[in-house]
Image (spheres, rainbow, N blue to C red):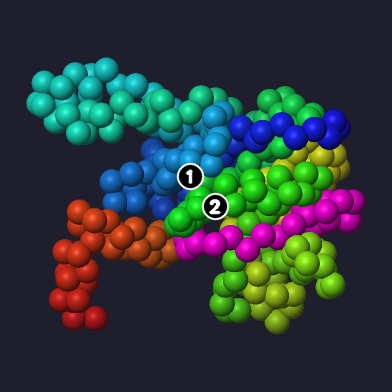
């Protein structure tokens, strides 16, 4: 692999899951299209990436996920309707969406194993051997002054030979939900020693949890092509990063901001409440409503 410092301009977003925890809501729509207030989950990810300097966004989907493509495409019918109804603010907002980035869609192949590392295999031919890129899980959101992706990019610029993974502390009672890091002792930059996917609480090496943002490069394919499936017979990125840490530097960067996951109904609702309260237009009224409830 060539070791130059090309600007990171490409992001891959994993959106090929079935969202079974949200059935029947996800029977005919992708989980990533569920709204947080009035914007689908995946648009938050795209906007974070774009605010971090990303220009090309590759979304890995599956059969039945056409709604994702339609969302980031133009809708002449809708635009004409909004124009005729003089809803010009909504018209402007709608027209901005297709122009956020250059979008590419790749179907996840059925001959690959299921898992959160599998989408990377699907985009191998779209990754140059001299570029780093962003990888994002489709159900993790980060609210922060500096976009989470940009924080990782800045770390990578200082450590051009490293992979960078976003992490945040979680309660010990929740470590069995995430990839959990063991950091190398004596290092100043949170270098990863290994990572364990969904460990038992009493066996977790820390409460430092992987939160769905990564800077990788072509070397990830050296590992993935020989990686065996892990828990649940799935292909886990945590397992790939554990192998990567044996060969070169992998940094576990503590992202500044509030990380919320939308991976299950409870946490999805918690995310919706959090984002609603932060809205200037509805936040105060919603806060008063919550106070009025007999909880």
Residue 113 pos. (x, y %): 70, 42
Q: Residues within 10 Å of mark 2 (few under 14, many from 20)?
A: many
Region in magenta: 241-265
Does residue 35 belong to the magenta stretch? no
Q: Which residue is rendered at x = 43% and y = 30% of the image?
A: 100
Q: Which residue is rendered at x = 54% and y = 62% of the image?
A: 256
Depth check, front residue: 121 or 98 = 98
Q: Viewed as shown, does residue 204 lie left or right of 287?
A: right
Q: Is residue 221 visible?
A: no
Q: Using the rendered view, name the quadrant where residue 223 is placed.
A: top right
Q: Which residue is rendered at x = 74% and y = 27% of the image?
A: 128
The residue that label 1 is drawn on is 48
Residue 196 pos. (x, y %): 74, 65
Q: Using the rendered view, name the quadrant where residue 83 is placed.
A: top left
The residue that label 2 is drawn on is 148
Q: Is residue 31 visible?
A: yes
CB contact under 8 Å: marks 2 and 1: yes
């Amino acid at each position: 692999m060539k070791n130059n410092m090309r600007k990171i301009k490409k992001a891959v977003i994993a959106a090929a899951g079935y969202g079974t925890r949200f059935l029947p809501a996800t029977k005919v729509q992708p989980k990533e299209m569920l709204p947080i207030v009035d914007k689908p989950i995946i648009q938050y990810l795209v906007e974070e990436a774009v605010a971090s300097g990303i220009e090309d966004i590759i979304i890995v989907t599956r059969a039945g996920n056409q709604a994702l493509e339609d969302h980031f495409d133009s809708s002449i019918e809708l635009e004409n309707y909004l124009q005729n109804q003089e809803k010009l603010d909504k018209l402007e907002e709608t027209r901005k969406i297709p122009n956020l980035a250059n979008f590419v869609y790749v179907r996840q192949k059925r001959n690959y194993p299921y898992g959160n590392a599998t989408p990377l295999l699907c985009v191998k031919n779209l990754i140059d051997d001299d570029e780093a890129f962003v990888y994002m899980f489709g159900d993790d959101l980060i609210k922060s002054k500096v976009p989470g992706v940009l924080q990782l990019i800045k770390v990578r610029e200082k450590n051009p030979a490293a992979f960078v993974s976003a992490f945040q502390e979680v309660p010990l009672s929740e470590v069995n939900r995430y990839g959990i890091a063991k950091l190398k002792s004596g290092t100043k930059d949170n270098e990863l020693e290994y990572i364990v996917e969904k460990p038992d609480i009493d066996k977790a090496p820390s409460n430092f949890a992987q939160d769905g943002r990564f800077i990788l490069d072509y070397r990830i394919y050296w590992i993935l092509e020989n990686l065996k499936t892990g828990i649940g017979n799935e292909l886990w990125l945590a397992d790939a990063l554990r192998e990567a840490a044996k060969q070169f530097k992998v940094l576990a960067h503590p992202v500044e901001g509030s990380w919320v996951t939308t991976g299950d109904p409870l946490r999805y609702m918690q995310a919706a409440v959090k984002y609603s309260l932060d809205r200037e237009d509805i936040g105060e009224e919603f806060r008063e409503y919550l106070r009025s409830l007999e909880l």
